[in-house]
Image (tube, helix red, strand yellow):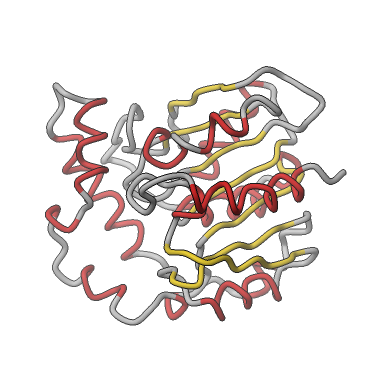
Amino acid sequence: MTIDIHHETHGLPSEATPLLLIHGGGSTIGTNWGRFIPMVAPSRQIIAVELQGHGHTASHPERTPSFENSADDLAALLTRLDIGPVDVLGFSNGGNTAMRLAMRHPGLVRRQIIASALFRRDGMIDGFWDGFAAPDISQMPTVYLDADRAINPDDPEHQRLLFELDVQQMSNFADWATTELAQMRIPTLVIGADRDVVRTEHTVELAVHTPDARVLVVPGNHGDFLGEEFAADDDTALRRTLPWLIDFLDQP
């Protein structure tokens, strides 16, 4: 079962391959990509999405949230739009969804950037999983809750379901085998920050087990190098990192 997911198109078709943006957990197009899109859309078409229960997309609590389900939703969207293969940039949970898209629907992806993603639970920093023992919506960053309220002012349940869906998806996460990473036979850039919630050595290991992958570790925290609203006060880190990303995407 796939669901309809909200998407926005920015920029006009060009010689550059369209870029699919996949946000992180709890986020929206605006909070994750609000600084990124204006910098990149003048040179390439962007398709930005909001996954199950996020932003403008319905919660569908009857369907178990998973990276696999979200990948299939994206494949259905790209097929419906008749766009592909595309380049993909996925951040955090969006990075895991991007990897599943490349594994399950390889013909739809040309190149991918996997940012701050994991493939084993022990890849996260100490204490990361502690909050999942007794999750409470007060743990969710206010910037995400405010963004969702602004989009869904008449649906207060949307924020609660958003939180519960994200918690369920991460709580259910089971380690991926390195043989699964080996299925991604497309050019891949794996990126993380030196103060990320994903251990640097795990980011490197992800790249090691992915054919045709390279790794980039930048100064910063979880998401500031992409201009993510919760992580970054401004676009300084994004401007420093963006040339590396564009150079990778511009390669044939």
Asked whether the viewer can see residue 174, the reply is no
Quarter of the figure with the C terminus: top right
Q: Residue at x 45, y 55 (%)?
A: 223
Q: Residue at x 60, y 56 (%)?
A: 114
Q: Residue at x 14, y 21 (%)?
A: 154
Q: Nearer the viewer, residue 231 or 98?
A: 231
Q: Considering only vertical position in the picture, is 27 above or below 56?
A: below
Q: What is the x, y in percent for residue 164?
A: 22, 51
Residue most extreme to the right: 252
Q: What is the x, y in percent for residue 174?
A: 44, 70
Q: Along the horizontal axis of the image, is 55 left or right of 111?
A: left
Q: Residue at x 40, y 66 (%)?
A: 173
Q: Considering only vertical position in the picture, is 214 above or below 68?
A: below
**Location of residue 44 (image quadrant):** top right
Q: Nearer the viewer, residue 193 or 82?
A: 193
Q: Considering only vertical position in the picture, is 80 above or below 219?
A: above
Q: What is the x, y in percent for residue 52?
A: 37, 38
Q: Considering only vertical position in the picture, is 243 above or below 192?
A: above
Residue most extreme to the top: 12
Asked whether the viewer can see residue 51, the reply is yes
**Location of residue 177 (image quadrant):** bottom right
Q: Along the horizontal axis of the image, is 45 left or right of 247?
A: left
| Count of residue discs | 0
Q: Along the horizontal axis of the image, is 29 left or right of 178?
A: left
Q: Along the horizontal axis of the image, is 54 left or right of 23?
A: left
Q: What is the x, y in percent for residue 157?
A: 14, 35
